[in-house]
């Protein structure tokens, strides 16, 4: 039985290393922090310090101002801290679990104030989307693409943002939004096809 458990955890570690591009040392260290926080909530500080900047920037890209982003980030970490006991090591790293909480907090914020979700992107990230639609990159198309993205539903925009703006793998996107990897691929490519058709009409 112990041998089977060891093989399972070894395979799980290899899978996480390959999928999420993190080191074995980081996995072990993060696991120690989580177990410590589950025993004593004061130990959550290590996770907070390690992930704060990453989560803040993730949220800030979706907010109209820095103060609002800081407030939503604080709420996300509070939610993570109060629910740390629910986290288990089942092939999804803590970072994906934390990003899911952050995304939920962003969505909750916009449901409450009814304002439009803000997304920011670099030209290079927009160019990556155009490359997926097999379009030649030029300034006119970049402007048209930016306008097309504004017409997407919040759910579709989140998938595009996670895949291209955050540069996450389909598996990471799937874990964050709570769907299968194959479903994430299907949804993203359907969105890209809609964008492609819209660009053709407008060009």
Image: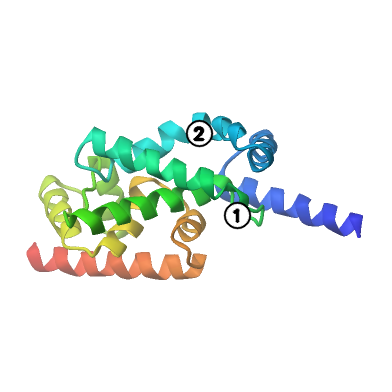
Say whether residue 135 is visible. Answer: no
Q: Nearer the viewer, residue 111 or 14?
A: 111
Residue receiving disc 2: 48
Q: Secondary structure at mark 1?
A: helix
Using a 10 Å C-alpha cutoff, classify the residue at mark 2 as few (fewer than 14 neighbours), some (14 to 19) or many (20 or more): some
Q: Could you tell me which quadrant the C terminus lies in?
A: bottom left
Please determine whether, in this image, residue 44 is positioned above or below residue 85.
above
Q: Earlier in the sequence, mark 2 or mark 1?
A: 2
Please determine whether, in this image, residue 29 is positioned above or below residue 72.
above
Residue receiving disc 1: 86
Spatial CA span between label 2 and label 1: 17 Å
Q: Secondary structure at mark 2?
A: helix
Q: Relative to 163, is 46 on the left or the right?
A: right
Q: Nearer the viewer, residue 58 or 38?
A: 38
Using a 10 Å C-alpha cutoff, classify the residue at mark 1 as few (fewer than 14 neighbours), some (14 to 19) or many (20 or more): few
Q: Quadrant of residue 71?
A: top left
Please determine whether, in this image, residue 200 is positioned above or below residue 22.
below
Q: Quadrant of residue 159?
A: bottom left
Q: Could you tell me which quadrant the N terminus lies in?
A: bottom right
- Name the spot of residue 65 as percent of width and height, x first: 20, 37
- Name the spot of residue 77 as percent of width and height, x first: 45, 41
Say whether residue 90 is visible. Answer: yes
Q: Nearer the viewer, residue 125 or 151?
A: 151
Q: Relative to 154, is 198 on the left or the right?
A: left
Please determine whether, in this image, residue 6 is positioned above or below residue 185.
above
Q: Nearer the viewer, residue 99 or 170?
A: 99
**Tag on residue 138?**
none
The residue sitting at 58% across, 47% down in the picture is: 84
């Amino acid at each position: 039985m112990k041998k089977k458990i060891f093989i399972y955890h070894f395979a799980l570690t290899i899978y996480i290393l390959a999928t999420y591009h993190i080191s074995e040392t980081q996995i072990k260290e993060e696991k120690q922090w989580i177990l410590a926080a589950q025993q004593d909530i004061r130990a959550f500080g290590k996770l907070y310090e390690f992930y704060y900047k990453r989560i803040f920037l993730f949220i800030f890209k979706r907010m109209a101002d820095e103060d609002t982003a800081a407030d939503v980030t604080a709420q996300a970490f509070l939610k993570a801290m109060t629910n740390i006991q629910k986290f288990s090591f089942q092939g999804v790293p803590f970072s994906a679990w934390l990003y899911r909480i952050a995304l939920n907090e962003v969505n909750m914020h916009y449901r409450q104030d009814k304002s439009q979700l803000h997304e920011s992107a670099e030209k290079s990230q927009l160019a990556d989307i155009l490359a997926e639609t097999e379009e030649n990159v030029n300034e006119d198309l970049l402007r048209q693409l930016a306008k097309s993205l504004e017409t997407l539903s919040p759910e579709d925009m989140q998938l595009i943002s996670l895949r291209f703006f955050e540069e996450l793998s389909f598996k990471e996107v799937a874990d964050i939004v709570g769907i299968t990897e194959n479903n994430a691929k299907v949804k993203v490519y359907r969105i890209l096809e809609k964008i492609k058709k819209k660009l053709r009409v407008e060009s």
